[in-house]
Amino acid sequence: MKCYMCALEGKDSDAVAICVVCGMGLCMDHVIREEIEIWEGGFPLPSKKLEKTLPKMLCEWCYEAYQSG
């Protein structure tokens, strides 16, 4: 798989990750790693934030949408 963002720029780069939101292939220059918090608990409350986080690989477009919300 090739990096979609590189293809738009006229480059040919191998993808090393896939955006978990849109499925776009991304190279190391275009992938954004976002750490997300993990919450544990029942409905409706109480809940607590766990110590560890999970990595989420995103493209630039989905990262911007994720940050705006």
Image (cartoon, helix red, strand yellow):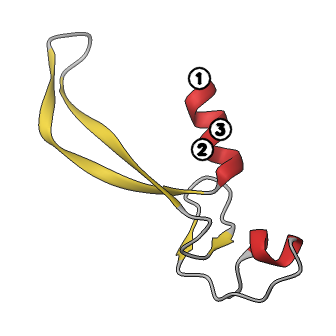
Q: Earlier in the sequence, mark 3 or mark 1?
A: 3
Position of residue 30 relative to residue 43, above or below, is: below
Position of residue 33 relative to residue 5, above or below, is: above
Q: Marks 2 and 1, Cα distance to the nearest angstrom?
A: 10 Å
Q: Which residue is the site of mark 2?
A: 63
Q: Secondary structure at mark 2?
A: helix
Q: Position of residue 7 (x, y in %)?
A: 83, 78
Task: State the residue lying farthest toward the left.
Answer: 51
Q: Are marks 2 and 3 in contact (CB under 8 Å)?
A: yes
Q: Amino acid at mark 1?
A: Gly
Rendered-image quadrant of the N terminus? bottom right
Position of residue 52 relative to residue 24, above or below, is: above
The answer to which image quadrant residue 40 occupies is: top left
The mark closer to the camera, 3 or 1, is 3
Q: Which residue is the site of mark 1?
A: 69
Q: Check disc 1: other Cα within 10 Å, few if <14, some if 14-19, many if 20+.
A: few
Q: Amino acid at mark 3?
A: Glu
Determine which of the numbered discs, if any, sits on residue 60 in the image. none
Q: Marks 2 and 3, Cα distance to the nearest angstrom?
A: 4 Å
Determine which of the numbered discs, if any, sits on residue 64 in the image. 3
